[in-house]
Image (cartoon, grey):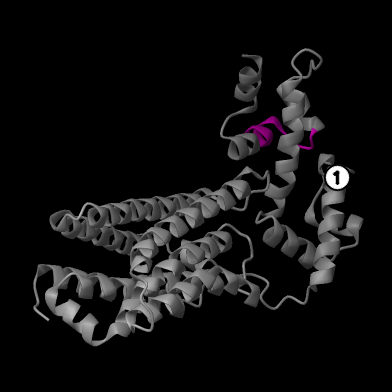
Amino acid sequence: MKVDFYTIFYGIAIFQAFLMSTFFFLNKKGLRSSNRILGTLLSFYGFYLIFLMLASSHEGSLILSRIPALWLLFEFNYCFGPLLYFYTRSAAGDSFQYRLRDTVHFIPCLATAAVAAGVIFKIYNLNWFLWANQQAVIIHLAIYIGVSIYSVRSRIKSPFSPVDDIRLAWLKFLFLAYIVILCTRIFVTLSVVWESYELFIISRLIHMFFIFIFFNATALIALLKPELFSFIVRYQKSVLKDSDRESYKRRIIEAMEQDKAYLAPACTLTSLSKRLSIPVPHLSQIVNETFNLSFPDFINRYRIEESKQYLSQLQDNKMNILEIAFAVGFYSKSSFNSAFKRHTGITPKEYKRCKAA
């Protein structure tokens, strides 16, 4: 194959894809499921780029004609959407673990690969399939991007959202990268429709360029924010049973929402543990893993929600900020102000002013 600028460009991108994929597969410091999903995603992009490199040159096209099975690399496109969905669920604190039933997401990839194999090896003639496959890939990826965004947004709207600002920024970047790559892919398809060879070459190069940027940005983020991919998994040796976990979780929620245990200023991990007859380590584990919050933040979230009701009752409520702080369980006005601003982004006084406007 002739070595030119484009070949070198593709080669660097392919090398980066597999290098970062290896990094995530070998990273044992974080949540293995998330790292493995991301590693798989990057390796599939590497295989896809190999196909693009071969399809973009005369010599590569000869290789594809001699080894028709290489055309099946295109079908990896149907894996990008499901892997994005799995990764966002895992990164958004959904405790995602791949199970056999999740294989259903890869049925489109297996089905189209089977049909494509028949076309490629001339078992049957379906000339329309290659064109339809191009469009199906775009629609398939667009659907999974939408579902993934909806999944994360639903987690964010929860008052106990496990998605912190750093992780949210990373997921936003990931979605943006996918959308840009999808848009450039649409232009590649349109260039085929318009039968413009020049536009086809340019659009495919731009498509590959943004994938290249995505790889480099991911590598840079991994260097600057390693905690995104290496957060320590606690309680790996915990003996907490799933049945006990659900039972404890219900008792905790009941104590918070019905009994309003958080209103007691002395509501500590130990005191709540004694009240609910839940061992302290298990109580801490459930709060950390289920709500992805520290115990103080868990209690303060409820207190803040309670205080919002007082602050919203403008006519009936004559209590000042300090009195509201004491009423919802805080020891001082300063701790109430700092907790309120940390959870809402504004102070109690600003919140009250917004409600009055």
Q: Residue furthest front?
A: 125
Quadrant into which the C terminus falls: top right
Q: Quadrant of residue 201?
A: bottom left
Q: Residue at x 79, y 71 (%)?
A: 242
Q: Quadrant of residue 293?
A: bottom right
**Disc 1 residue crowd, few under 14, some 14–19, many 20+, Cα 10 Å:** many
Q: Position of residue 2 (x, y in %)?
A: 8, 78
Q: Position of residue 84 (x, y in %)?
A: 48, 62
- Residue 159 magenta-drawn? no
Q: Residue at x 61, y 59 (%)?
A: 93
Quadrant into which the N terminus falls: bottom left
Closer to us: 150 or 291: 150
Closer to us: 242 or 342: 242
Q: Is residue 323 visible?
A: yes
Q: Position of residue 203 (x, y in %)?
A: 22, 55
Q: Residue at x 60, y 35 (%)?
A: 344
Closer to us: 173 or 223: 173
For the record, the magenta segment spans 328-337
Label 1 sits on residue: 261
Q: Relative to 124, does residue 160 appear above or below in the rendering?
A: above
Q: Does residue 300 appear to the left or right of 207 in the view shown?
A: right
